[in-house]
Image (cartoon, grey):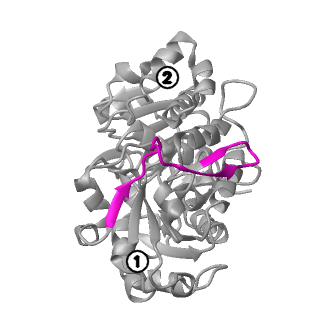
């Protein structure tokens, strides 16, 4: 027997396994962390993709909107990137700090309080630069036009009125948009509720209540969500992207800056190179952690691990997911969809007023139909039982219920950064 270590919330869990059953312990492909974040950032800004260097692209004295991600994506540690980026704008681009507004791209999420904003941007930046929360229901949203997918594009007024917009975000796999980051800083990041809901409704199959087969992890070609997001971003004038790529240990490894689309595409290629792991076969079972807090802060956030690792699991296989979920489902409405699930009104409600928490809830129910999913979590069993998920508060009881005897197993300590695929 060998004990395997998994992060869980702020702590860890040890699980003993018969090594003869373990097909492999998957960690992603090794890429070293950036030796110096300021130096790596500077190199990206001065050697951008398909745009001039930032100090030539931004003119002295212009007003800059710097769009950054919210606390749900704090795993990318943008607090280590924002200070040198603000300094670069001041020292190299000639943009005074009072001409910079940092906009937190909350999408449909609630904006954080001052303590959270200070955490996101650091005290030093918060005390010198204006920081605001994007509100998708704000009365002063600015209309930019309508996409070919009939999505009306409304965005944050301060971004729309700035001379230059710089978006800072991390690229990773995404079950709806194919990849996160890049154009997602605009839609959904700083878009209006109507814009976000119309775009995200393409997650549903047009004919029945199920996920649209054209979306999925790593899928960008002919993905209506991605196509729509890219078109919305193209409507924002003077747009510049700074794309962060984390290694499998969740350390900043690479930065790609420049054109809103092509710099992000380079980041996507890097994500595939780091996170996709070739395996010889699918396993009977997978044991995966989300990677600890904040990756496992809620089911809404943490079940992205299922999206990643299921490609290494046999149909009907067993997935053991270590997800503390101290915030429960996440958004208050997540578990509210149980009433629609039980009442048979889920499709009607989702199609009439699509929400991302509603879709993630549906996706989790679909996954529970495809696999035997057992979770070590703080969420009570009775709460998730209607979804088909099984919740345990004791790891020993969970392992007894999993019945892994004689089954092949993959161990994935950080399921947020590993996407297994069977090598042809």
Above or below, 61 relative to 70: below
**Res. 85 mark:** 1
Residue 278 visible in this rendered orientation of the protein: yes
Q: Residues within 10 Å of mark 1 (few under 14, many from 20)?
A: some
Region in magenta: 130-153
Above or below, 256 relative to 261: below
Q: CA–CA distance between discs 2 and 1?
A: 46 Å
Residue at 46% across, 67% down? 65
Q: Residues within 10 Å of mark 2 (few under 14, many from 20)?
A: some
Determine the image quadrant of residue 182: bottom right
Q: Nearer the viewer, residue 306 or 64?
A: 64
Q: Nearer the viewer, residue 296 or 115?
A: 115
Q: Is residue 122 left or right of residue 264?
A: left
**Res. 388 mark:** 2
Q: Nearer the viewer, residue 289 or 48?
A: 48
- Callout 2 touching callout 1 (CB < 8 Å): no
x and y, in percent, of residue 251 in the image: 40, 68
x and y, in percent, of residue 236 in the image: 61, 62
Q: Earlier in the sequence, mark 2 or mark 1?
A: 1
Q: Secondary structure at mark 2?
A: loop
Q: Secondary structure at mark 1?
A: helix
> Is 138 inside the magenta-drawn segment?
yes
> Where the C terminus falls, by quadrant?
bottom right
Residue furthest out toward the top: 343
Residue at 43% across, 43% down? 301
x and y, in percent, of residue 228 in the image: 69, 50
Residue 171 visible in this rendered orientation of the protein: no
């Amino acid at each position: 027997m060998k004990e395997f270590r998994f992060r869980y919330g702020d702590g860890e869990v040890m699980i003993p396994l018969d090594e003869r059953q373990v097909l492999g312990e998957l960690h992603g492909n090794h890429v070293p962390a950036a030796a110096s974040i300021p130096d790596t950032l500077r190199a990206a800004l001065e050697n951008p993709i398909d745009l001039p260097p930032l100090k030539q692209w931004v003119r002295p004295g212009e007003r800059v909107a710097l769009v950054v991600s919210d606390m749900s994506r704090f795993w990318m540690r943008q607090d280590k990137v924002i200070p040198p980026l603000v300094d670069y704008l001041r020292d190299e681009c000639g943009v005074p700090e009072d001409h910079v507004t940092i906009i937190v791209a909350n999408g449909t999420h609630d904006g954080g309080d001052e303590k959270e904003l200070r955490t996101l941007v650091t005290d030093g930046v918060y005390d010198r630069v204006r920081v605001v929360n994007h509100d998708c229901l704000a009365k002063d949203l600015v209309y930019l036009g309508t996409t070919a997918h009939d999505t009306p594009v409304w965005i944050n007024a301060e971004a729309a009125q700035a001379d230059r917009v710089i978006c800072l975000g991390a690229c990773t796999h995404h079950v709806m948009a194919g990849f996160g980051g890049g154009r997602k800083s605009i839609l959904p990041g700083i878009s209006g509720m109507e814009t976000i809901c119309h775009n995200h409704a393409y997650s549903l199959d047009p004919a029945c209540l199920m996920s649209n087969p054209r979306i999925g992890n790593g899928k960008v070609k002919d993905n209506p969500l991605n196509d729509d997001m890219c078109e919305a971003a193209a409507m924002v004038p003077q747009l510049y992207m700074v794309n962060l790529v984390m290694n499998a240990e969740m350390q900043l490894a690479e930065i790609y800056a420049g054109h809103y689309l092509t710099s992000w595409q380079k980041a996507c290629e890097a994500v595939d190179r780091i996170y996709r792991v070739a395996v010889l076969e699918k396993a009977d079972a997978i044991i995966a952690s989300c990677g600890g807090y904040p990756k496992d802060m809620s089911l809404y956030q943490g079940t992205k691990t299922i999206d990643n690792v299921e490609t290494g699991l046999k149909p009907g296989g067993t997935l053991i997911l270590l997800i503390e979920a101290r915030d429960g489902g996440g958004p208050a409405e997540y578990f509210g969809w149980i009433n629609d699930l039980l009442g048979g009104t889920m499709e009607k409600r989702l199609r009439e007023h699509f929400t991302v928490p509603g879709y993630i809830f549906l996706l989790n129910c679909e996954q529970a139909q495809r696999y035997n999913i057992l979770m070590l979590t703080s969420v009570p069993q009775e709460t998730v039982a209607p979804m088909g998920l099984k919740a345990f508060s004791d790891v020993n009881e969970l392992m007894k219920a999993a019945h892994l005897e004689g089954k092949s197993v993959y161990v994935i300590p950080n399921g947020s950064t590993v996407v297994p695929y069977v090598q042809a």
